[in-house]
Amino acid sequence: MIDFFKFLYSGGLIQNLLLSILSFAGGLFVAAKKEKLILSRQNAELLINDFFKPHTTDIEQTLFKKIPSQNSIDAIQMLSSLKDEINEKKLGFYFSESLLLWLNECIKLKELNTFWNLIYFIWSYYCFSRSYYKFMNQCRKQAGLPKRSLDYRFQHKLYYNPYLFWVVFVLKWVFILLLALYIFILIFLISKNI
């Protein structure tokens, strides 16, 4: 019996069997991932072509911006027509729950006659903007397009509070410079020790 196991081990039969099982499992994993990627890429391209491209000027260029109280009714009507279009084209299945939730919250406020309704609308619109922008970037990434960056938001003035946006923008570059300085110092110290 011991001779049989020596024969199996010495011939590499066990190694070959394990290698073939791992190769087969890896092939199944890659095939499943590829199919999922193709489906998600098709969904992303569908959303980009049927939804995001047509709404570049009316929705995307107004994200994160302050809506004056006299224009808030127009904004609610625009968002209502957006929801109607999502329902007509049956695209709601593809959207994130967060985006649909905040879109519904914005539309729900038909009358902004009180201070608290106006505050809630501003908050809901900000959350809708954040969800829309994040979901649009996910679709762009899956479709192979570059994501919209902070620079894009800055260039098109897509921010609610310019001072806060400047702080975030400057902190981003300060962090990048500090990281580069840290790496430079680390490389310098390592080269001195060698």
Image (cartoon, rainbow, N blue to C red):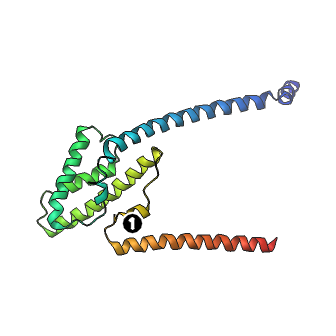
In which quadrant is the N terminus drawn?
A: top right
Q: Is 37 located above or below residue 178 in the figure? A: above
Where residue 187 appears, x then y in whole percent? 71, 70
Query: Residue at 43% across / 48% down in the picture?
Result: 140
Task: Name the residue furthest right.
Answer: 3
Q: Is 183 located above or below residue 38 in the figure? A: below
Q: Is residue 10 left or right of residue 64?
A: right
Q: How many marks?
A: 1
Query: Residue at 35% across / 58% down in the picture?
Result: 130
In which quadrant is the C terminus drawn?
A: bottom right
Asked whether 155 or 185 is in front, the reply is: 155
Query: Residue at 37% across / 39% down in the picture?
Result: 46
Q: Residue 24 is drawn in which quadrant?
A: top right
Q: Residue 128 is drawn in which quadrant?
A: bottom left
Task: Tell me which amino acid carries mark 1.
Answer: Phe
Q: Is 21 located above or below residue 61 in the figure? A: above
Query: Residue at 61% across / 32% down in the picture?
Result: 27
Where residue 59 appears, x then y in whole percent? 28, 54
Where residue 125 appears, x then y in whole percent? 26, 60
Badge 1 local density, few (<14 within 10 Å), some, or many (20+)?
some
Asked whether 109 or 62 is in front, the reply is: 62
Q: Is 192 located above or below residue 94 in the figure? A: below
Q: Which residue is mark 1?
A: 154
Q: SS at mark 1? A: helix
Where residue 88 appears, x then y in whole percent? 22, 38
